[in-house]
Image (tube, helix red, strand yellow):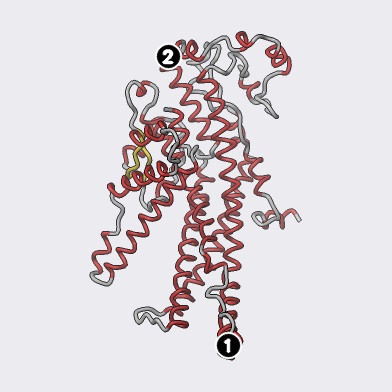
């Protein structure tokens, strides 16, 4: 069950996030196309362009079908995928499930509505907990996983949508192509070639700033996503899995919070003499508990408390408890969505203008020149908002890197207060591994002064 949560809620399977994003975008495009058709018939019918519960469930069903089609003909059956198909649900968010995580944890995730980005309405991923796993997993745990899923999926979705802009061939290449010889050697052909080249040069200049902004935003999203997925999610999961199956030697983790706060450069923070002593022991003495024996000595309450500690550490390390970070990040993702939509709209306008100029296909119900000028102005405004949004997010990260309260929380002083007394006497108790660090993310984002031009000017 935990592997299922890791693969689908924490996006261990990248193809799942990609397929779900593509199916959701396709559903929204179909809804708006039908709404546009209704606009010519009856205006009050536009209110029907709302995502319904059945459509959300249908998107998840098509996602499972896409994932199943990715398997080769002779591949073995994917049991984990079949289990996820039976247990994982995608539905519209409700108030009681939204507040479940807040009732479950003293420090819940920030109330930033990342769940709105996939369908433009609050949508959450839920899990049916079969018996007897309900003794270990609670509704609050699943709600926390849903919040993390919405957060990670929103970043992945923005990254995918920006990179998909490069698939629009007509925006990147000379379109339509100049005429071929011998027509291009004639006066009419030469005039046609000059016209097409002037048109392409004008549009290329228009899109240059958009490509620059999109490339920089892709870099920001890629580095942020890699930090969250590889260093935080994967690092904490591997350590928790080792403890869960009994591969973590009892006593190998530091027992005190002071030792736990020691830096872990290239290892898990153990003393060198302890490692040397363990290296000389037989394997049976290094791991005195097999996974079956260790699981037999851990009751559901112990596992549940350790799992909550893991979830708490994961939520904090992902910066989901920091509204000062999640709010500007959410605004940036909204700006990126709008920029992508405007670029697609501009490409549609240019296609219509080409048909009108080259083939004589005229749309009497639209003023394409006025729409083009309006969309260009909106794209310029949105580019500035995306740049400012990235600078705001990086600025928040810089403030967090020097915030003593935030650093103390990340060091673990406030992380285990709810379970410390319960697990105090257990020799092999679980202590979340110290992973990540905002400074590591900032070092990757700090390139060429694009994101921190204001900060660099102040230092100069």
Q: How many marks?
A: 2
* Vertical relation: 326 (above or below) 108: below
Establish if 192 lies above or below 444: below
Q: Where is residue 108 in the image (x, y as percent from the top left)?
A: 45, 35
Q: From the viewer's perspective, is residue 236 above or below residue 384?
A: above
Tags 1 and 2 in contact by the CB under 8 Å rule? no
Report the residue at 40% width, 81% height from top: 361
Q: Closest to the observer: 43 or 80?
A: 80
Does residue 131 show up?
yes
Instruction: From the viewer's perspective, tell me whether residue 10 is left or right of residue 248.
Output: left
Most foreground residue, 130 or 76: 76
Q: Which x, y percent locates residue 167?
A: 52, 60
Q: Quadrant of the N terminus?
A: top left
Q: Which residue lies furthest to the right in this view?
A: 460
Q: Position of residue 388 (x, y in %)?
A: 58, 58
> SS for tag 1?
helix
Q: Which residue shows up at 50% across the image and 40% down it? A: 320
> What residue is shown with label 1?
191
Q: Where is residue 11 in the image (x, y as percent from the top left)?
A: 48, 39
Quick check: can you spot residue 113?
Answer: no
- Residue at (56, 18) in percent of width and height: 247
Mark pair 1, 2: CA separation:
82 Å
* Residue pictured at 70% horizontal, 16% vertical: 275
The single residue placed furthest to the bottom in the displayed view is: 187
Q: Mark 2 points at which residue?
A: 299
């Amino acid at each position: 069950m935990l592997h299922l949560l890791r693969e689908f809620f924490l996006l261990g399977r990248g193809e799942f996030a990609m397929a779900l994003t593509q199916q959701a975008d396709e559903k929204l495009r179909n809804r708006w196309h039908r709404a546009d058709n209704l606009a010519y018939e009856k205006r009050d019918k536009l209110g029907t362009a709302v995502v319904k519960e059945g459509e959300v469930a249908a998107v998840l069903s098509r996602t499972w079908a896409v994932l199943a089609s990715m398997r080769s003909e002779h591949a073995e059956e994917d049991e984990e995928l079949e289990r996820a198909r039976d247990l994982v649900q995608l539905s519209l968010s409700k108030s009681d499930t939204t507040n479940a995580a807040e009732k479950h944890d003293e420090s819940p995730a920030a109330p930033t509505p990342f769940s709105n980005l996939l369908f433009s309405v609050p949508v959450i991923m839920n899990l049916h907990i079969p018996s007897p796993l309900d003794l270990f997993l609670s509704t609050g745990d699943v709600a926390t996983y849903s919040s993390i899923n919405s957060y990670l999926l929103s970043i992945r979705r923005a990254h995918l949508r920006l990179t998909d802009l490069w698939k629009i061939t007509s925006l990147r290449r000379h379109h339509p192509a100049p005429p071929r010889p011998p027509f291009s050697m004639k006066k009419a052909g030469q005039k046609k070639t000059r016209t097409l080249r002037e048109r392409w040069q004008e549009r290329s200049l228009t899109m240059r700033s958009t490509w620059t902004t999109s490339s920089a935003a892709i870099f920001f999203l890629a580095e942020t996503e890699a930090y969250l997925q590889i260093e935080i999610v994967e690092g904490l999961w591997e350590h928790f899995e080792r403890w869960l199956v009994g591969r973590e030697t009892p006593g190998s983790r530091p027992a005190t919070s002071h030792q736990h706060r020691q830096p872990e450069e290239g290892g898990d923070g153990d003393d060198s003499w302890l490692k040397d002593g363990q290296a000389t022991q037989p394997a049976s003495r290094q791991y005195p508990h097999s996974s079956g024996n260790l699981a037999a000595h851990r009751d559901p309450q112990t596992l549940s408390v350790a799992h909550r500690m893991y979830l708490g550490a994961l939520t904090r390390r992902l910066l989901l408890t920091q509204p000062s970070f999640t709010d500007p990040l959410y605004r940036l993702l909204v700006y990126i969505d709008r920029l992508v939509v405007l670029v697609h709209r501009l490409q549609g306008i240019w296609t219509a203008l080409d048909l009108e100029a080259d083939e004589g296909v005229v749309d009497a119900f639209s003023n394409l020149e006025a729409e083009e000028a309006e969309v260009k102005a909106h794209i310029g405004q949105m580019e500035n908002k995306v740049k400012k949004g990235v600078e705001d997010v990086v600025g928040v990260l810089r403030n967090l890197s020097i915030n003593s309260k935030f650093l103390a929380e990340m060091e673990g002083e406030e992380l285990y207060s709810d379970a410390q007394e319960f697990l105090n006497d257990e020799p092999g108790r679980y202590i979340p591994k110290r992973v990540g660090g905002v400074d590591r993310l900032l070092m990757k984002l700090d390139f060429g002064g694009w994101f921190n031009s204001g900060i660099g000017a102040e230092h100069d």
